[in-house]
Image (cartoon, grey):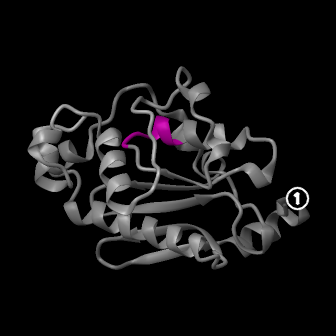
């Protein structure tokens, strides 16, 4: 839900306080751009997964603030049988001054890249302890505002390439706010897997 601290660094206003963030953003951007948007303002977990049919979407963007949720989304997407009904999953995780953007799904030349939980099994082994929100991390100095903005830019760039049907040659970008960027390319992963990686 929208809190007072969210107004300082996110696009919310006073009248939004107490409302589910997803609901506020769905109404706002649906009206602003004249598109039909909907949301389910609940945590995505074992209890609510049945209500959200992930194969109805083209793109799923992970903007969650804990590794347990990241692992669950990756796992649920992996269960979709038909590869062509499986949406592209773009995930981002970050810490103080850096992070990674991970792309799970069909990328260039009809190849499917690796799954987030396969490449980063450590996120599936997190305990159930709730992690602090981005706002709380900013307040206590364990995260910087520019880190969140950098994560958003990389997410948007991947979405833009996908929408414009540009082949995406990598499945992971590791970055820092000091302009250090490294990419892990799909070709290297495909060579290690052979034809099994092809759709």
Where's the N terminus, which quadrant? top left
Residue 140 horizontal side relative to residue 125, left or right: left
Q: Give the percent coordinates (x, y) of residue 79.
A: 73, 38
The residue at 37%/26% (across/down) is 129
Q: How crowded is mark 1: few (under 14 residues within 10 Å), some or many (20 or more)?
A: few
Residue 135 horizontal side relative to residue 172, left or right: left
**97 vs 134: above or below:** below
Whether the magenta-drawn stretch holds residue 66 is answered as: yes
Residue nearest the viewer, comparing 54 with 185 = 54
The residue at 63%/36% (across/down) is 53
Report whether residue 140 is seen.
no
Residue 137 horizontal side relative to residue 78, left or right: left
Q: Determine the residue located farthest toward the top in the rendered image.
A: 47
Magenta portion: prevailing SS class: helix
Q: Give the percent coordinates (x, y) of residue 163.
A: 57, 71
Label 1: element kind: helix
**141 vs 167: above or below:** above
Instruction: Give the magenta range.
Output: 65-70
Q: How many labels does the image show?
A: 1
Q: Give the percent coordinates (x, y) of residue 93.
A: 42, 53
Q: Give the percent coordinates (x, y) of residue 76.
A: 64, 37
**197 vs 82: above or below:** below
Residue nearest the viewer, comparing 125 with 79 = 79
Whether the magenta-drawn stretch holds residue 122 is answered as: no
Q: In this figure, which residue is indicated by the disc labeled 1? A: 196
The residue at 17%/46% (across/down) is 6
Report whether residue 59 is seen.
yes
The residue at 45%/56% (across/down) is 35
Residue nearest the viewer, comparing 91 with 56 = 56
């Amino acid at each position: 839900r929208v809190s007072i601290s969210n107004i300082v660094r996110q696009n919310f206003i006073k009248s939004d306080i107490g409302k589910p963030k997803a609901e506020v953003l769905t109404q706002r951007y649906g009206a602003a751009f004249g598109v039909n948007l909907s949301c389910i303002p609940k945590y995505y977990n074992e209890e609510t997964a049945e209500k959200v049919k992930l194969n109805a979407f083209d793109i799923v963007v992970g903007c969650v603030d804990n590794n347990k949720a990241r692992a669950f989304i990756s796992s649920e997407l992996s269960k979709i049988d038909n590869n062509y009904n499986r949406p592209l999953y773009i995930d981002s995780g970050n810490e103080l001054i850096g992070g990674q953007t991970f792309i799970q799904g069909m990328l260039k030349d009809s190849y499917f890249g690796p799954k987030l939980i396969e490449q980063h099994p450590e996120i599936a082994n997190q305990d159930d302890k709730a992690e602090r929100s981005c706002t709380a991390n900013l307040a206590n100095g364990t995260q910087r505002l520019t880190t969140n903005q950098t994560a958003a830019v990389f997410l948007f760039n991947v979405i833009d390439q996908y929408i414009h049907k540009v082949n995406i040659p990598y499945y992971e970008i590791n970055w820092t706010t000091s302009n250090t960027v490294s990419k892990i390319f799909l070709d290297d992963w495909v060579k290690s897997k052979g034809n099994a990686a092809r759709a």
